[in-house]
Image (cartoon, grey):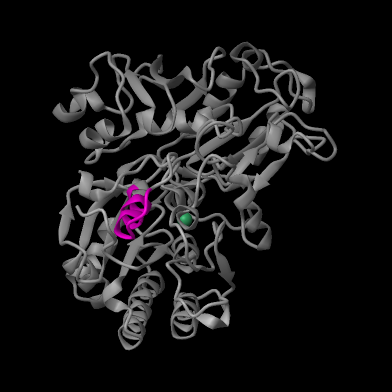
Amino acid sequence: MPRSNLVNQVILILIDDLRASHLFDLINKGKIPYIAQIAENGISSQNCITSFPSITFPCYSNIILGSYSGYFPKEGSGIPMYHWVGRSHPIIEERKFPIIRHCGKGSHLLKLNKDLGPNCQTIFEQAGEGNFLSSLNLINRGSVLIPPVEYTSSSILKGVQEIYKNPKKIFLNKDVPKVTVAYIPKTDDLMHKKGFDHPEYIKEVIDCDRYIGSLIKTLKNTGYYDSTAIGIISDHGNYKSEKLYNIAPFFKEKGFTQYLPRKGAGDFDCAMGGLGFFNFPGDNWFNHPTIEQLKNFGPSGVGNKELNVFDTLWNIPGVKAMYYRDNDNTPDKGLIYLEHKEAETGKKLTDIIEFEGHGINQKTKYIPDEKDFYKYNKYEESARLIDGKAHSIDEWLEVTNQIDFPILVDQVPRYFKNPRSCDVLTSNLGEYGFGYEHGETAASVHQYSHDIGIKKSMTVPFIIGGSSNIPKLELSYCKTTDMVPTLIMLLGEKSHYSVVGKSVFDY
Ligand SMILES: [Zn+2]
């Protein structure tokens, strides 16, 4: 590929909660002609693997950075998940208590830009000189954010058109933005409340296509179309859980009491959907507990009886797996245990994930027990990497992109290295939806969700097109963190050292 730029502008459109197969079905049915045309004439993959956990944060922030969470004082992003308990760390040491961050809706979401930390860069920060625009994009560090008139797909995409017609509206010079990121949240809202198979959800995706068509028209009218790359991606796919369950009484009965940072009270914090993120104090809330502390834990509620946290959490309906870190882990090196049970006998088994190194240089080894929870041994491709050696993210991607738990051996350590990660992570593989957070079950819990590591929740579309300078390329697989380095390459700029993804022309 040439070193110089192939385009002068990029527009990245992130449609929240869109499974790859659903988008490409709509393309094949002729329902979304504009997106189809961009994909047809440019770069596309129907098998782009996102981050784990497959939740908006971190998946969305990871796309904007081209990197993942990690030990963020040294590497990657400080956003391990949308819900986290801050522990002892320089960034927050001015605070009296560890905090609980919840990235729901509203303006406090912009605090996320600070949470990213200093060791990663947004696409704007990596793109050199120019004007940078965010239309509702909340990970907007380095750009000007325009709020939408309303939170609809049309309003967010029209916002981009307006600035292309009249850049002076928000920029001092008349240059159109070099990088634009538009974030579309409505699809996610409809997916949870109605479902991926509901006409309203499908209509919203079709509407996105219509407004992308309108944006293409504006780009053509203003003469920018042939110098602009349009990227389309999603943060995660989705699934439907089989059953709903109110877990709040269970925690109460065990004596777990919700941690309230401001009061310094409580012994437990949990956010649980298909995955359960459990936080407990160690010597205090600034420290993660050791395995022994979790095995001999004294909850402050009812009865005050000491219990084994692991055994207790195994009694939650539907739990199939439990992750936790080794006591001796350092940011550079460590072990993550993946406990699961033999279906027939209930016997506990433990797979081990070993990690070493940072960012692009992280290597991980998978040491499964005889039952091998991820079933990597079952498939010829993935079985090749169970060889007692450590492997990179791209090696794992190559052999696991067709099966459940794609790249999880790489992703799990990146999550657990973050000081803000939980102590015990459970998964029920989608059997139950719990909707539990901040000590209670949400008023409205929905069966439609995303978070677990199965393939349909982890696979999104990857499309870049527009300018005729963009080569035609169909990829059998890639990963979401490849989007930013590919766009940065098209702009003729150089990606930040923290980027873990790679230009898709390097596959
Ligand atoms: Zn999302």
Q: Which one is in front, 464 or 455?
A: 464
Specify whether residue 319 is in view: no
Q: Is residue 368 left or right of residue 470?
A: right
The span shown in magenta is: 482-494
Q: Which one is in front, 448 or 96?
A: 96
Q: Position of residue 147 (x, y in %)?
A: 59, 73
Q: Give the prevailing secondary structure in the magenta stretch.
A: helix
Q: Position of residue 451 (x, y in %)?
A: 45, 45
Q: Is residue 331 left or right of residue 20?
A: right
Q: Position of residue 310 (x, y in %)?
A: 56, 20
Q: Residue at x 78, y 39 (%)?
A: 260
Looking at the image, is 408 positioned above or below residue 502? above
Please tell me in which quadrant of the rendered image residue 303 appears. Answer: top right
Q: Residue at x 51, y 29 (%)?
A: 416
Q: Which one is in front, 416 or 443?
A: 416
Q: Position of residue 177 (x, y in %)?
A: 45, 71
Q: Residue at x 27, y 61 (%)?
A: 463
Please tell me in which quadrant of the rendered image residue 405 appears. Answer: top left
Q: Quadrant of the C terminus?
A: top left
Please tell me in which quadrant of the rendered image residue 23 appears. Answer: bottom left
Any magenta on residue 486? Answer: yes
Looking at the image, is 411 positioned above or below residue 3? above
Q: Residue at x 44, y 85 (%)?
A: 165
Specify whether residue 198 is in view: yes
Q: Is residue 31 left or right of residue 202?
A: left
Any magenta on residue 343? Answer: no
Q: Which one is in front, 131 or 317?
A: 131
Looking at the image, is 51 positioned above or below residue 253? below
Looking at the image, is 490 positioned above or below residue 271? below
